[in-house]
Image (cartoon, rainbow, N blue to C red):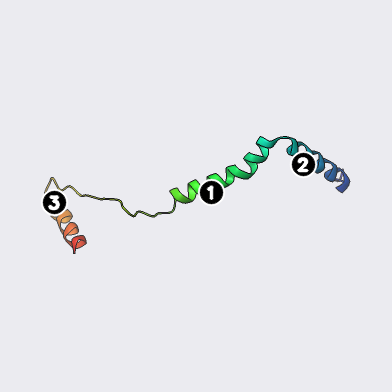
Amino acid sequence: MSPSFGRVGVVALRVIRQLKRDRRTIGLIVFAPIVLMILFGYALSGDMSGVALGLVDDGGHAALRAHIDIKAR
């Protein structure tokens, strides 16, 4: 049984008619991906400006002190 292009066209037309009547579905199809792309783009951008970072050396480890001294220069 091979699919007929006529039948595919009829089913596609029926789906399009149903979508035209349902505004919420059209909104989800159009706006949800846009909102998700903006959110994920912002979250995964890797831009770390304005973030304060501090290191606490309570143990007095020489390796950590050497690393802090190198980064401070």
Q: Where 15 falls versus 5 (above or below)?
A: above
- Amino acid type, callout 2: Ile
> Which residue occupies the foreground of this view, 45 or 71?
45
What x and y, as percent, mark residue 24? Answer: 65, 35
Q: Place residue 20 in its image quadrant.
A: top right
| Residue at which label 3 appears | 61
Q: Secondary structure under badge 3? A: loop
| Residue at which label 2 appears | 16
Residue appearing at x 62%, y 39% in the figure: 28
Answer with mark 2 or mark 3, whichever residue precedes in sequence.
Answer: 2
What x and y, as percent, mark residue 39? Answer: 49, 46
Answer with mark 3 or mark 1, whichever residue precedes in sequence.
Answer: 1
Q: Secondary structure under badge 2? A: helix
Q: Secondary structure under badge 1? A: helix
- Whole-angstrom CA distance, mark 3 to mark 1, is 44 Å
**Mark sitting on residue 37:** 1
- Amino acid type, callout 1: Met
> Which residue occupies the foreground of this view, 25 or 9?
25
Q: Quadrant of the C terminus?
A: bottom left
Taking 55 as reference, is 25 left or right? Answer: right
- Amino acid type, callout 3: His
